[in-house]
Each structure stands twice: as C-alpha cells, then as structure tokens.
Image: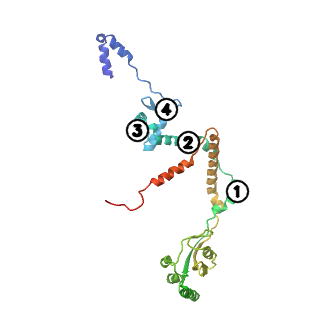
Amino acid sequence: MSRHTLLISARQLPRLGALSLLLVGCSKPPQPLPSVTKDGTPVVAMVGTEPITMASLQVIAAQNGYNLQVDKDRELAIRDAVNNEILAAKAKELGYENDPDIRRYVKSQAVQKLLLATVDKEHQGAVPTEAELKAYYDANLAQFTPPTLAKAQILALLKRKGQEQPFAQKLDAVKTALAAKQVPFSELVKQFSDDPAAQTYAGMTNWLVKGEANKQYPDAVLQAVFEAKDASAVVGPIEHNDWVYFVKQTELRDGKATAYEQAKAQIAQQMVRQKRLDAYSSFVEQLKGSVQVQTFPEKVAAEIQATTQQSGPPMGPVRVK
C-alpha cells in the first residue's frame, strides 16, 4: 500500500468505520536493516530476510572487476549481489539445492574448508631442515640422475632360410666396405639393410635408454651402442636369432646427477607435499574409527564390464535396405 493510499484512508477514517481502523492497525512497519550479521560482518543490503554482507560484495566486485570506490561500480556490484540472491532464492524454491551435482560440489568445498582448517593449518609454513633435505637427496639420488641416452645407426641383415649363400655374400660385402672406410656408414645402411625403415632413415634410432629393454633391438645391440668408445667406430657383426647387426653410435647423453644445491628447492617441495599427504592420511584414518565403512569393488567391476559390453555398435557388416 502506497503512502498516497494511506493518506486517503486516513482522511476517510470517519466514514470507513471500525473495519478501516482494524486494517490500518494491522499494517506492519518495515523491519530495520541490521547493521551487522551475528558474526559481526557489516550488512550492506537485504533481499527479503537474506543479508548481503560487505564480504560477499567484495567477492562479487573482485570477480567482475568492479572498483567499490567508484560510484558506478559500487552500484553495479550491489545490483549483481541483489540479483544473485534473488536467483538463489528461486533456485532454492525449485529444489536445485538437492541436485546431485550441486550436493557433490558443496561437499567438495566443505572438505577443502575442513582440510584448510586442520591438516593445512598444522603444516602451514613448515620448512624441512637442511639435514632433512640432504638426507632425502642422498637416499633418492637416482631420482635426481637422468638416464644415459644414446642414438645410433644400425645396419641389420636378415638370414633367410634357403638364402644362406646370398646372405654370406652380402655380409662379406658389408665387412669389406667397412674395412675400406670409403663409403659413409649411412650409405651402407641404405644399400644393404634388410630393415625397410632403415632405407628411409639410414638406420637412425630414436633415443635409447641405458638399462631399459627395447622391443626392436636385442640387449647385445643396446650394449654395443652404450659401450662404444669411439663415435666414429662401427661395432659388429652382432648375431641374434636370424639377424646380424652392425652398430655405430651417433650421439650420447651421459646421465649426470643434479647437484644438491640445485635440487634443494625441488626436494623441499616434495617433502612438504609428502608431509601433508601423510598428515591427511593420518587425519582420515582417525575419523574412520568413528564411522562404518563398506566398499564393494566387485560391483564397480561389474558396472564397468556391463558398460563396456554395451558401448558402441555391434560388430559385423551393416546392411542397408
């Protein structure tokens, strides 16, 4: 009811009688705006009974790039805060608060708040000592030592059944050419190799890792690559099953350990992270003592299997009618 209507009603009170007096007496004055919330946060607006605090307004301003010292930006921030509360009220009315995705998100945020107030608070600012850092480095030196890598050119000859004589002739031709040292090894690979890929890449390998098995080349070949003393020398013949190999190392990257002083920052990060994980696990284990936990991994496996079997179209030809 507007002020104008109230004034008219007041003038007409003598004619309206007791009913009008009753109606006027029942009107409630507007509730005063609370200055702060229960926890002392300043209230800057109200939407129904829902207060908008200065803290929430500052969050909205930061999210949208508003400067609260500027009148126009301040108005926009308040507008957005009010709109957000109106929409939130409507979403609550429609039951979106009970949406599974919303509940999962709220639960996730609650967990993060809990960890910040417990696990993270206890370990905030914790810095490993120099002795702890050095002990970690010494115990995990392999972690700070990259593997030795090498590339090589490999000439591979295949001994086929019934082709022993041609194979022997080809092998002699390779040996003779290597001894003469007049033709580059890469050209010999292209000319004689029985590996089709070697014809294109002159037998050049990808990076090989010392101590790591390779599906394409036998261990004896890898050993020859890494033990080569002279990068210009060709090692071979190396026999393995029906293959005979000649190997020439082209590049070697010897794995050297990162110095302690260079690794300290990385070690500190890893130790702090590990301490937090240990504290997290300990905290959760303590909480598990007060709640019953049951897991059903077989159900997970069954659901995954059922989903896999049902996914995709059936195998076989598709007939078009």
Look at the picture and state if 228 lies above or below 274: below
Disc number for residue 120: none
Q: Answer with left or right where residue 57 lies relative to residue 213.
A: left
**CA–CA distance in space, label 1 to label 4:** 52 Å
Per the image, the residue denoted by label 3 is 80
N-term-proximal mark, 1 vs 2 = 2
**CA–CA distance in space, label 4 to label 3:** 18 Å
> Where's residue 164, x and y in %?
56, 85
- Image quadrant where one finds the C terminus: bottom left
N-term-proximal mark, 2 vs 4 = 4
N-term-proximal mark, 4 vs 3 = 4
Q: Can you tell which quarter of the image residue 291 is in?
A: top right
Look at the picture and state if 51 lies above or below 8: below
**CA–CA distance in space, label 2 to label 4:** 27 Å
Cβ–Cβ below 8 Å for labels 1 and 4?
A: no
Look at the picture and state if 272 lies above or below 202: above
**CA–CA distance in space, label 3 to label 1:** 55 Å
Per the image, the residue denoted by label 2 is 111
> Where's residue 107, x and y in %?
52, 41
User: At label 3, which amino acid type do we have?
Assistant: Asp
Per the image, the residue denoted by label 1 is 135
Q: Answer with left or right where residue 33 lies relative to residue 171.
A: left
Disc number for residue 42: 4
Q: Nearer the viewer, mark 2 or mark 3?
A: 2
User: At label 1, which amino acid type do we have?
Assistant: Ala
